[in-house]
Amino acid sequence: MSTITLNGKPHPVPTSITLVELLTSLEIDRRTVAVAHNGDVVPRDRYDGVCIEDGDTVEVVRMVGGG
């Protein structure tokens, strides 16, 4: 197991997990969020290629519509 910082809090994750796998484990629809990995915003079409490693920081922001 590894530990990452997820939205400012420590969060355990399996070793060698991708961003898509992380979002799936959190039951988050990747189409409705924006994600930053180690401070860089990740385009949705690249989520599969981002590997999460011990000590990484991930910020997940849900998009909210309104008017």
Image (cartoon, grey):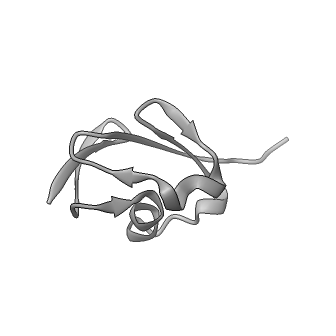
Could you tell whether 35 is left or right of 57 in the image? Answer: right
Please identify the residue farthest to the top as the structure is shown.
Answer: 39
Could you tell whether 14 is left or right of 25 in the image? Answer: left
Q: Quadrant of residue 37?
A: top left
Could you tell whether 14 is left or right of 20 in the image? Answer: left
Judge by depth and name the residue closer to the eye, 3 or 8: 3
Q: Quadrant of residue 67?
A: top right
Counting from the top left corner in percent of width and height, residue 6 is at 34, 44
Number of marks present in the image shown: 0
Q: What residue is drawn where x is 38% and y is 54%?
A: 51
Could you tell whether 7 is left or right of 54 in the image? Answer: right
Q: What residue is drawn where x is 45% and y is 62%?
A: 23
Q: Quadrant of residue 5?
A: top left
Q: What residue is drawn where x is 39% and y is 62%?
A: 22
Q: What residue is drawn where x is 65% and y is 57%?
A: 45
Please identify the residue farthest to the right as the structure is shown.
Answer: 67
Image quadrant holding the N terminus, namely bottom left
Please identify the residue farthest to the left as the structure is shown.
Answer: 1
Counting from the top left corner in percent of width and height, residue 59 is at 45, 40
Counting from the top left corner in percent of width and height, residue 24 is at 45, 70
